Amino acid sequence: MSLERFIKNHKNEFDDEKMPNLASLDFEARIKKELHYSNQPKRLRFLRSFSIAASILLLVTLGYVFNQNRVEDLKIRDNLVLALGENQTNSTRLEAIYEIEDRYDNQEEDEKILEAFFKILKGDSNSNSKIAVIDALLNFPDNPSVRNNIIEALANEKEPLVQLKLIKSVTLLREQRAKASLQQIIENNESLPLVKGNASASLAMLNQ
């Protein structure tokens, strides 16, 4: 049988109008799949760009908020330091000391605040202010400047109440360098018996 005659006899099978339904469905599915993959890169690029922009905006916002908070904290710190000055009343200084203790609890020591504390400790300030400062300084037992200033204050302090507080402090700190000052207090005829007794007890503890 010739090819031409075979095609004529099977013409209906080659008619485009009667393609199998399964073939049509398969063709449609392939088209949709291609369209989906062709749009996917654009969508991914958009999502990636959006994520980057959002991250940058978040970082800028956080940086701004952090800087604002930092400026506010420094302003408060400076006002508290001013409240510790020599020209302030004892009650003003006490309020500032207690506020500093509350505000900076469990935080790293601030050098500017420490310097103001040391100035009170070494000066002719009221005994209550000195005792409050010593309590505040004991929150930083590992700070070398704190330890040095407490030892120096013990060697020079003449007020009995402050002496007792300093003796207790060097005992808590287990500060061996305070032995000479403690011995000096013990041998000083002007030292009160109570102060001498505490100094002797502290010295005995440090010698153990």
Image (tube, grey):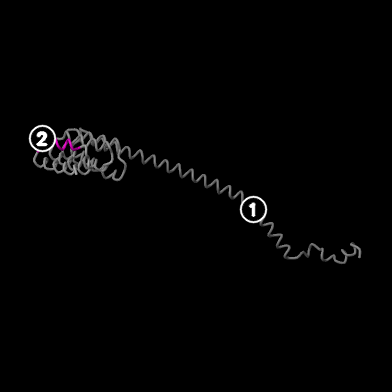
Residue 40, position as x, y percentages in the image: 61, 51
Whether residue 127 is in magenta: the answer is no
Q: Residue furthest front?
A: 208
Quadrant in the picture for the N terminus? bottom right
Q: Which mark is residue 37?
A: 1
Residue lying at 55% horizontally and 47% vertically, measured from the top left? 48
Residue lying at 12% horizontally and 38% vertically, measured from the top left? 186
Which residue was labeled with disc 2? Answer: 188
Numbered disc in front, either 1 or 2:
2
The residue closer to the viewer here, 4 or 157, is 157
Q: Residue furthest right?
A: 1
Question: For numbered disc 2, what is the local secondary structure?
Answer: loop
Residue 123, position as x, y percentages in the image: 19, 33
Q: Which mark is residue 92?
A: none
**Quadrant assignment, res 73:** top left
Q: Is residue 131 above or below residue 7?
A: above
Quadrant in the picture for the C terminus? top left
Q: Is residue 158 above or below residue 32?
A: above
**Quadrant assignment, res 63:** top left
